[in-house]
Image (cartoon, helix red, strand yellow):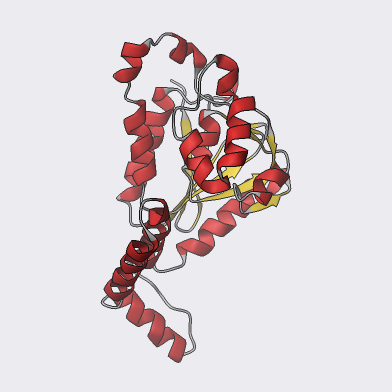
């Protein structure tokens, strides 16, 4: 049986997940999303995993949903589809999730990127929401997450035309944080993940929570949440270790306590 996603340790504390349906251009069928959720669930409870890098291959990150699977589903079937719950599980992952994108990230593949916390793009990366060409709209947060990221104007244009977005445009509009040579995309993403993995795990977790909450809360609520986390971290051993290491002029050793 084909291994839908390959999992490996790319660096100390870094789990590398590689989408592995090259014959289908890494189309995201339910089985692949279920596999991703299971791997993230394992990573969630594995203290040795501090960050996760998700990638495809040199030509394609993920070319969208699996249309053969989607075509067999009518409106009733879609109402009962497990897919929305799988996307929710991906969104609920509490550790840093970094996408390393080469080639095409289309439709659901683009939406998977939008579920990531950080994105590193190869120079050949291309994004699009092509659902309009099938008489549909994005169904896994494409209109909602992208509009919150780049604004209404660009999202309206891209969702209504299916226009391709280059790596340069993606960086310009904040879809990715860095564009690198295609052959080095995964390496750069792993280096970033490894740098994060050396930080205090509890602080990393609440930083992610605080930043992700900005679209759900008012500024005053967000500031209150941030302050609560700031105070909570003051009671952790890692915070004391960080301060002691600073005064002792040594590198801190964080244990997630």
Q: Considering only vertical position in the picture, is 189 above or below 137?
A: below
Where on the picture, by quarter, is residue 100?
Answer: top right
Q: How many marks?
A: 0
Residue sitting at 41 percent across and 30 percent down? Answer: 33
Quadrant of the image containing the C terminus: bottom left
Q: Position of residue 206 (x, y in %)?
A: 36, 62
Q: Considering only vertical position in the picture, is 23 above or below 14?
A: above
Where on the picture, by quarter, is residue 23?
Answer: top right
Q: Considering only vertical position in the picture, is 58 above or below 64?
A: below
Left or right placement of residue 74 versus residue 102 in this view: left
- For the residue pair 224 and 80, the one nearer the viewer reads as 224
Q: Position of residue 236 (x, y in %)?
A: 28, 75
Residue sitting at 46 percent across and 42 percent down? Answer: 115
Q: Considering only vertical position in the picture, is 68 above or below 144?
A: above
Quadrant of the image containing the N terminus: top left
Q: Position of residue 168 (x, y in %)?
A: 72, 46
Residue 128 visible? The answer is: no
Q: Position of residue 250 (x, y in %)?
A: 48, 84
- For the residue pair 145 and 27, the one nearer the viewer reads as 145
In the picture as drawn, the residue positioned furthest to the bottom comes out as 247
Residue sitting at 61 percent across and 51 percent down? Answer: 174
Left or right placement of residue 233 versus residue 50 in this view: left
Residue 112 visible? The answer is: yes
Left or right placement of residue 105 versus residue 255 in this view: right
């Amino acid at each position: 049986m084909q291994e839908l996603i390959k999992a490996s340790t790319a660096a100390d504390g870094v789990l590398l997940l590689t989408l592995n349906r090259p014959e289908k251009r890494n189309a995201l069928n339910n089985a692949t999303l279920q596999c991703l959720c299971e791997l993230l669930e394992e990573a969630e409870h594995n203290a040795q995993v501090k960050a996760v890098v998700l990638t495809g291959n040199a030509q394609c990150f993920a070319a969208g949903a699996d249309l053969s699977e989607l075509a067999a589903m009518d409106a009733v079937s879609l109402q009962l589809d497990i897919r929305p719950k799988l996307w929710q599980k991906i969104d609920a992952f509490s550790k840093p999730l970094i996408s390393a994108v080469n080639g095409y990230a289309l439709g659901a593949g683009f939406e998977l990127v939008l579920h990531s916390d950080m994105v590193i793009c190869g120079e050949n990366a291309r994004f699009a929401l092509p659902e309009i060409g099938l008489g549909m709209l994005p169904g896994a947060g494409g209109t909602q997450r992208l509009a919150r990221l780049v604004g209404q104007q660009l999202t309206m244009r891209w969702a209504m035309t299916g226009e391709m977005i280059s790596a340069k445009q993606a960086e310009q509009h904040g879809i990715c944080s860095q564009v690198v040579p295609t052959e080095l995309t995964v390496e750069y993403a792993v280096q970033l993940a490894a740098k994060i993995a050396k930080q205090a795990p509890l602080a990393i977790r609440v930083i992610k929570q605080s930043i992700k909450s900005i679209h759900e809360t008012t500024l005053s609520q967000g500031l209150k949440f941030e302050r609560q986390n700031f105070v909570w971290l003051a009671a952790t051993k890692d915070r004391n270790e960080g301060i002691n290491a600073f005064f002792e002029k040594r590198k801190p050793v964080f244990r997630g306590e």
